[in-house]
Every structure is written in structure tokens, then in C-alpha cells.
Amino acid sequence: MNPPVIHSLRQQIREHIVEGIVSGRWQPGERIVERRIAAELDVSQTPVREALRELETLRLIESAPNKGVRVRALTAADLEEIYPVRAGLEQIAAELAVERLADDVSALAPEVAALREADRLADAEAQVGHTVAFHHELVKASGNSVLLHTWESLGIEIWTALSIRWLGTRQRSYAEEHQELVDAFLRRDPRIGELVKEHVLNCAPRA
């Protein structure tokens, strides 16, 4: 089996486990049994183990000797911790990306359009997906690969989904708030970094 297939399989397993945690299939404190997941998905235990290690790095699960792997009992404070880190990264990204996005917002516009439809339908899953995609494109536009890699390693989509689905965290209008950022890029707002930072911090759950 070549590396790309292994990587893809691990990602699929990771997404399966994350969905189980977010949807409540596995409750906080509940044990996740590696061999059961392997049997359910008809895969070996090796990629399951690798996926679980990634999720432990993201602090979604925890392991202990003789106790196995369990879902962490996350609180609003746990979910809130990531936002200042993310806000700082996106502030830098926005300042680096402003000239590029002022000339061409075509990477951001489709996500805003999709968010309008998601808002209309109150589709939480689509709101999460297109919100994360918008911010991913914003960070990509910085042209800084280290910044992008760091941002991606935070597992933004997972934490955004958990904030919205577990705590009911939401913005007044996903489309409107992101359109305001697009408009700020178009006018080369000198405060663009601060605007993006404030936007991200305003999305944080409150402990």
C-alpha cells in the first residue's frame, strides 16, 4: 500500500471518530476501543491507532495506562483556549494577505454565498464547513506556508463544530460577518488584522 492511500485511510478513520464524538455517539469519559473501530471499518488496527494519536494531540481524547483511550470531558474553557491562538495567526495572515485579496476576493466570495444559503436553512453543518473554508482561504492567501501549516494543525473545523453543536455558539449571521471582512479587504482597511482578530475572538464560547 502506498503512502497516499495510508494517509487517506487514516484521515477517513479520524473523521469517523470525530463525527462520533461530535454527534454524541461517544460521550465524554467513554472508552473508545481501537479493535472495535477496526472491525467496524474493516481495517487493521494500525491506521486506527495513528488516527487516535492525532486526536490525542488535538486534546479530543486522552489515554492512560491500563485504562485505554477515552473521550475527554471538554468544557467551554477548553474550547475557548484555541481562539486567542487562532485569532493571532489569522491577524498575521490578514495583514500579509491584504494586497492579494484587495485585488481578487474570488477565493472568499463563494464561501460567503454558501453561508447565505446555510443561514437561510439554519444548516449548522454547512455553516461550520463554509466558515472554516473561508478562513482557510484567508490564511492561504497570506502566502506563508509555515503559517498555513500551523493553522491547519489546530484542527479548526473540529473545534468550530464542537463549539457550535455542543455549546450553541453562533454568530448573528455567518454570511453578513464574513461579507464584512471581504469588504474590509476590498477597501484595504488599515485595521484589517485587528478586524479579523476581533471577528475570531467574538466567535469564542464563553466559559
Image (tube, rainbow, N blue to C red):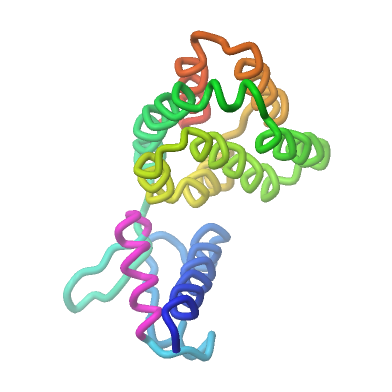
Q: Residue 64, percent across and down?
A: 20, 69
- As displayed, is residue 26 above or below residue 5? above
Residue 35 position within the rendered picture, expressed as x and y whole percent measured from the top left: 39, 87
Which residue does the image show at 49% across and 63% down from the upper left? 18
Report the front residue among 125 and 21.
Answer: 125
Q: State which quadrant residue 59 falls in.
A: bottom left
Q: Which residue sits at x=47%, y=31%? A: 204
Reply yes or no: does residue 59 show up in magenta.
Answer: yes
Q: Is residue 74 above or below residue 47?
A: above
In percent of the image, x 39 and y 68: which residue is there?
30
Q: Quadrant of the N terminus?
A: bottom left
Q: Is residue 45 left or right of residue 27?
A: left
**Residue 72 at x, y percent in the picture:** 35, 58
Indicate the position of residue 67 as horizontal and vertical percent values.
23, 75
Residue 27 vs 96, above or below: the answer is below
Q: How many marks?
A: 0
> In the image shown, does 26 or 179 lie closer to the viewer?
179
Q: Main secondary structure of the magenta part?
A: helix
> Which residues fall within the magenta stretch?
46-60
Residue furthest out toward the left: 65
Residue 175: within the magenta?
no
